[in-house]
Image (cartoon, helix red, strand yellow):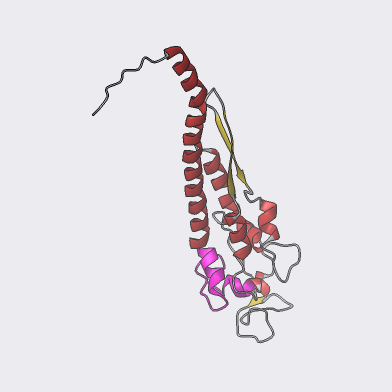
């Protein structure tokens, strides 16, 4: 047997209850939406860094061609920078992966706010991209500016005594060379993605 029951609602109490719960309900929805958009931009940031020709060239090691083109086709960045580690970009990757979403507020005026915690700074990037043979200099910042020193003194050849195994710095300039800058690499990306994160809306 089914019972049909009619209920008279206390409209005044119902309105008050809905009004009290609405900010929380909407806030949860907004938080989820903002978080998903944060994850999407973070993923895009990491993907762009990993697919950038400079990252790919550095990760390819001392035998890589100069696919980035900033050395005008001579040698490669790995041997010019004098690396001796498997992945010189790992410090930047760590910084990018450490970015976190923190929802801070949703008020009755329907204003939402959040923070991107651990967003990398230029200082943090330069700290994790040291130039092995020039203490205090950053290879990532040098790429951005196009001014890593001693490119004219760089000789690309097999050399057992070199860190990379395929490059060395000779005392005198071999020829006049200049490296190009690349404003689209990680230092330039910071400005781009700072703007993208700040532009997130529900």
Q: Is residue 107 magenta?
A: no
Q: Residue 94: x, y in percent?
A: 61, 60
Vertical order, 92 against 99 (above or below): below
Number of numbered callouts drawn: 0
Evaluate whether residue 69 shows in this view.
no
Q: Residue at x 51, y 67 (%)?
A: 56
Image side of residue 93 versus residue 163, left or right: left
Q: Position of residue 97 (x, y in %)?
A: 58, 56
Determine if residue 53 is in view: yes
* Residue 184, image quadrant: bottom right
Question: Which residue is at 51% across, 32% downward?
Answer: 27
In the rendered structure, the answer to whether residue 19 lies left or right of residue 3 reads right
Which portion, as a residue range, is magenta? 53-80
Q: Which sits in the foreground, 201 or 100? A: 100
Q: Residue at x 66, y 74 (%)?
A: 82
Q: Position of residue 168 (x, y in %)?
A: 67, 79
Q: Position of residue 30 (x, y in %)?
A: 48, 35
In terms of depth relative to the viewer, which is nearer, 143 or 198? 198
| 130 to 197, vertically: above or below | below
């Amino acid at each position: 047997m089914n019972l049909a029951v009619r209920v008279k609602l206390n409209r005044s109490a119902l309105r008050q209850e809905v009004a009290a719960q609405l900010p929380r309900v909407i806030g949860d929805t907004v938080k989820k939406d903002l978080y998903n958009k944060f994850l999407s931009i973070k993923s895009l940031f990491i993907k762009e860094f990993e697919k950038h020709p400079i990252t790919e060239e550095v990760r390819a090691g001392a035998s890589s061609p100069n696919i980035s083109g900033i050395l005008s086709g001579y040698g490669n960045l790995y041997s010019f920078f004098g690396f001796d580690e498997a992945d010189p970009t790992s410090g930047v990757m760590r910084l990018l992966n450490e970015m976190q979403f923190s929802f801070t507020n949703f008020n009755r005026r329907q204003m939402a706010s959040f923070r991107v915690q651990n967003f990398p700074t230029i200082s943090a990037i330069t700290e994790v991209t040291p130039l092995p043979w020039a203490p205090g200099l950053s290879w990532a910042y040098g790429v951005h500016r196009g001014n890593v020193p001693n490119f004219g003194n760089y000789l690309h050849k097999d050399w057992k005594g070199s860190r990379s195994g395929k490059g060395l710095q000779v005392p005198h300039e071999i020829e006049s060379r200049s490296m190009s800058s690349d404003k689209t690499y990680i230092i330039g990306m910071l400005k781009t993605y700072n703007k993208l994160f700040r532009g997130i809306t529900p």
